[in-house]
Amino acid sequence: MTRSPAPSSAGTPSGPADAVLSLRDASLAFGDRTLWSGLDLDVRRGEFIAVLGANGSGKSSLLKVILGQQRLSGGSIRFLGEPGRRGDRRIGYVPQQKLADDGTPLRARDLVALGLSGHRWGVPLPSTARRREVDELLAAVGATAYANVGVSTLSGGEQQRIRIGQALAGSPRLLLCDEPLLSLDLTHQRAVSELIDRQRRERDFGVLFVTHDVNPILGMVDRVLYLAGGGFRIGTPDEVLRTEVLSELYGSRVDVIRTHGRVIVVGAPDHSHVHEEHEPTPGRAHGRGAEGLAS
Ligand SMILES: Nc1ncnc2c1ncn2[C@@H]1O[C@H](COP(=O)(O)OP(=O)(O)OP(=O)(O)O)[C@@H](O)[C@H]1O
Ligand SMILES: [Mg+2]
């Protein structure tokens, strides 16, 4: 197992002052299988971090740890200076894509409204204020045109915008997105990526964005966390997405090819994906198929 020091600083032991999330010497194991260990990670306010790695490397599990749904095997986690707890509404979550079942009677605006706490400082929001807030969120995610349409009739990309609107409704300080680009076409991949990028700048929340293809967000991310073989690397894309860095992480020769501003990873032993711009096909990018990836 590689216990991987980051190529760039992961922060001081107490973490930077603007960290919304800090993991220290964090490890997660199931039985005798260690997914990752020695993980020091700070997510700063407004920072956009891509989480990359093979199927089963522990990306979704990391999000579950942050959501308080999974306990660390070792080390510590702090969110806004406090020990992590389950159900903290200041963490927004866009789960791995699951299309709304046919026949769901909810409209787009109803789903976004569900994300609102309904209370501010203990006072219930009056319905007009609530409606105005939902309208603003729908506009922010570019979904005004289908605000009153049943979500089950919307396309995957349109539903994804609604899901992001719902996650933003809680005014998150940290947004967790688990493969939000899965099954979206290139136009919608770009739209969803740019939406998250713009919102984190405007609202100053940190983002952890799990993806199998870094290319749609390569120009947006501040850093990447790359999980593989029980180890990890954290740094800027230029620091981490390099032949020598990933070869060391995987413990075997991996080639990182950069062409036309895109990154292609070739030869990763446990990795079926390439960081390549393509229209994702469930079952091609994910060996287990989408249903095995539910978060
Ligand atoms: N509660 C659990 N008990 C035992 N094993 C688990 C548990 N949760 C996850 N695992 C295992 O841990 C590994 C990592 O799972 P995780 O879902 O975090 O992977 P991932 O990196 O998100 O993969 P993918 O790219 O396929 O979504 C998998 O092999 C999974 O089967
Ligand atoms: Mg996953």
Image (cartoon, rainbow, N blue to C red):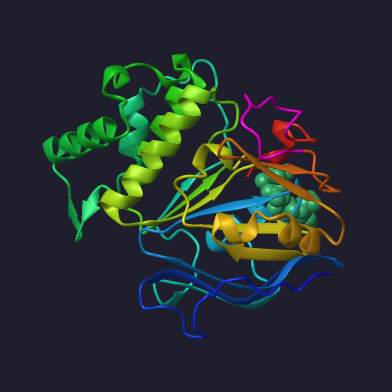
**Could you tell me which quadrant the N terminus lies in?**
bottom right
**Could you tell me which quadrant the C terminus lies in?**
top right
Q: Position of residue 56 (x, y in %)?
A: 76, 50
In the picture, measured across the screen, residue 52 lies left or right of residue 99, that is: right
In the picture, measured across the screen, residue 44 lies left or right of residue 218, that is: left
Residue 276: say if magenta.
Answer: yes
Residue 206 shows in the view: yes
Q: Position of residue 43 (x, y in %)?
A: 46, 65
* Front one among 2 and 81: 2
In the picture, measured across the screen, residue 156 lies left or right of residue 6, that is: left
Residue 229 shows in the view: no
Residue under the image location 60 percent in, 65 percent down: 234
Residue 89: say if magenta.
Answer: no
* Front one among 40 and 174: 40
Q: Position of residue 75 (x, y in %)?
A: 64, 79
In the picture, measured across the screen, residue 53 lies left or right of residue 186, that is: right
* Front one among 43 and 289: 43
Residue under the image location 65 percent in, 27 percent down: 280
Q: Position of residue 217 (x, y in %)?
A: 50, 42
Residue under the image location 45 percent in, 38 percent down: 193
Residue at the outermost bottom position: 13
In the image, residue 86 sits, relative to residue 144, either above or below, namely: below
Secondary structure mostly seen in magenta is: loop
The stretch in magenta equals 273-285
